[in-house]
Amino acid sequence: MRPASHIESPPAPLHGGRLNGAVARYGIAREHWLDLSTGINPNGWPVPALPAEVFNRLPEEDDGLQQAAADYYGSPDLLLIPGSQAAIQALPALRWTQFGTARTGVLYPAYAEHAFRWQQAGHRVERLEAEQIEARLDSLDVLVLINPCNPGAISFTPEQLRNWHTRLAFRGGWLVVDEAFIDATPELSLIQADMPEGLIVLRSLGKFFGLAGIRVGAVCAEAGIREALARELGPWAISHPARYIARQALADVEWQQRTRAQLSQQQARLHALLHEYLNEPVLSTALFAYVVTEQAAQIEQSCARAGILIRCFEQPAALRFGLPGDEAQWQRLQQTLNEIRE
């Protein structure tokens, strides 16, 4: 699964969470920063002490993680991977190997790795705003979406996505849906007990569970795609400590239900706060809010000078705010926004 060697790679995209860079740029010690740049749950699943054997033994696939994931996602048709980024990088090369160059539509604005990786693998990439997809769908071989969208915070209904999948699959096409931010609203998920051909769904434990550091995700797809990805990733793709933590987190139904309720309340609070102080329309998911504003760069810098790291985008000029983790952080954000307004 390797792309054509003659393809010139586009420049790699930048991402949020670059806290060390902010420390160096603004001269504020790391412990004094409030990092709202990533959209990761600041109150993630509480990781227990780990037994020594998870560090000194190789991981084993029959440790219960596969079943815990199947129960959580509602499908046995899944491959566990070292973070959804692994699939984002591997799928374009797999498509190229099987079918050659694909006319690929990628939602825009959206997580830039998707368009970057499909372009890097030699595919013809067209960045599409949500309202352009319907008119362009029948000219595409692959459609790549994030639902709900990062950073744009829009959501697609399962009915709409199933329609698009049917039309693509009829021509041998793929619908790839990145559901990294969907865990708080699982009713929107496209995962099925028996995954059909042409539908590939990516999931992650990084956002809702707040476990970005363990690098665990899943690909839900038909067997051929899972088997090809498994061959590419090889054995022991997920570390033993990561598997140990992921299994318990996926099985903790009580924590999941409680967290969904809490995130709903926090989402409403962040939405209202940003609308009040920035006086701009706000779109939000359970884990972040998105504000399009011509003052994005100035607001980002003002927040950074106050030790608050947020994510700024250029096209369109916009900001993404993650959730504060406690009341003191909420008050700090509100005070900074008030100072910016004044």
Image (cartoon, rainbow, N blue to C red):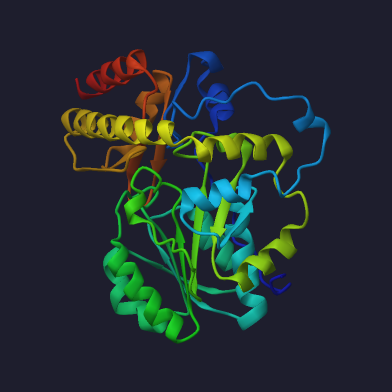
Q: In front here: 154 or 229?
A: 229
Q: Quadrant of residue 3?
A: bottom right
Q: In front here: 334 or 224?
A: 224
Q: In front here: 340 or 265?
A: 265
Q: In front here: 30 or 59?
A: 59
Q: Is residue 98 left or right of residue 166?
A: right
Q: Is residue 14 left or right of residue 230?
A: left
- Report the number of discs: 0
Q: Is residue 131 visible?
A: yes
Q: Quadrant of the C terminus?
A: top left
Q: Residue at x 83, y 31 (%)?
A: 56
Q: Is residue 84 visible?
A: no
In x, y percent, where is residue 26?
50, 21
Q: Quadrant of residue 261?
A: top left
In this picture, is 121 found above or below 35?
below
In this picture, is 123 found above or below 19?
below
In x, y percent, where is residue 138?
37, 83
Q: Residue at x 28, y 68 (%)?
A: 159
Q: Quadrant of residue 143?
A: bottom left
Q: Is residue 60 left or right of residue 75?
A: right
In x, y percent, where is residue 144?
45, 65
Q: Quadrant of the N terminus?
A: bottom right
Question: Given the current orientation, which residue lies at the most extreme bottom position?
Answer: 171
In x, y percent, where is residue 75?
50, 59
